[in-house]
Amino acid sequence: MPHKLTLKALAPVTHDTNHYVFDRPEGIDFEPGQAAALMLDREGWRDEDRPFTFTSQPEDTILEFVIKSYPDHDGVTKRLPDLSEGDHMLMTDPFGAITDHGPGVFIAAGAGVTPFISILRRRSRDDALSGSRLLYSNKTEADIILKEEWERMDGLNPVFTVTDEESSDFAQGRIDRKFLQKHVQDFEGKIFYICGPEGFVDDVRDSLKALGAEADNIITEEGW
């Protein structure tokens, strides 16, 4: 039976991404990086579930999500920004294979960075970022989620790249084999986390394997 959530707050993060805060029902346990499926508690929408990652910590008294909306898709994310305080959503039990397996290289595209938010925040809080790095691809600078926070994390040294903004001072182009060779010094024995669109995950995984990364050390979320 799904859990019922009540929206406590909503605030923008980027031009198309928002931060959502809900109350926390009893009996919800998760690890940093894990997700749950959310449904609008409205007629005709209760069976339309989508997976979203918790950005709060397991010990927090509230549940938080950072969710990118897609106005051109007539689905759940298009309607989420129109929620008001006190509105309800339904949520499944938590799930997900992306959890903290140790320091490593976190590789994301777009909203794929969300599973890494709680993991990296916790590591930053615990002064345990040593050996980790964030490689993050977006279409434009305006699409980068939590750019300033990543830049402030001591020891993370994020690398941003954009694909559709030639005037940007950031690196240009996709995260591919050449990009990985430039920004990763050693592939053997290192843990790699990948999240983003399916094609992105497949391409980066293949590149990492070709460069010497061990398959068991590549952490992805399958089947989303």
Image (cartoon, rainbow, N blue to C red):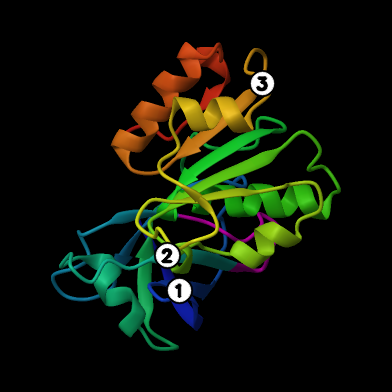
Distance (Cα) linking label 3 and label 1: 33 Å
Which callout, 2 or 3, points to the residue nearer the camera? 3
The residue at which mark 3 appears reads as: 190
Residue 61 forms part of the magenta stretch: yes
Relative to 215, is 117 above or below? below
Picture coordinates of residue 146, whole percent (x, y):
58, 64
Residue 212 forms part of the magenta stretch: no
> Can I make out residue 94 in this image?
no
Q: Residues within 10 Å of mark 3 (few under 14, many from 20)?
A: some
Distance (Cα) linking label 2 and label 1: 6 Å
Picture coordinates of residue 219, whole percent (x, y):
52, 28
- At a point 49% along the width and 73% down the height, the residue shown is 20
Q: Secondary structure at mark 1?
A: strand
Q: Secondary structure at mark 2?
A: strand
- At a point 84% along the width and 49% down the height, the residue shown is 126
- At a point 66% along the width and 30% down the height, the residue shown is 101
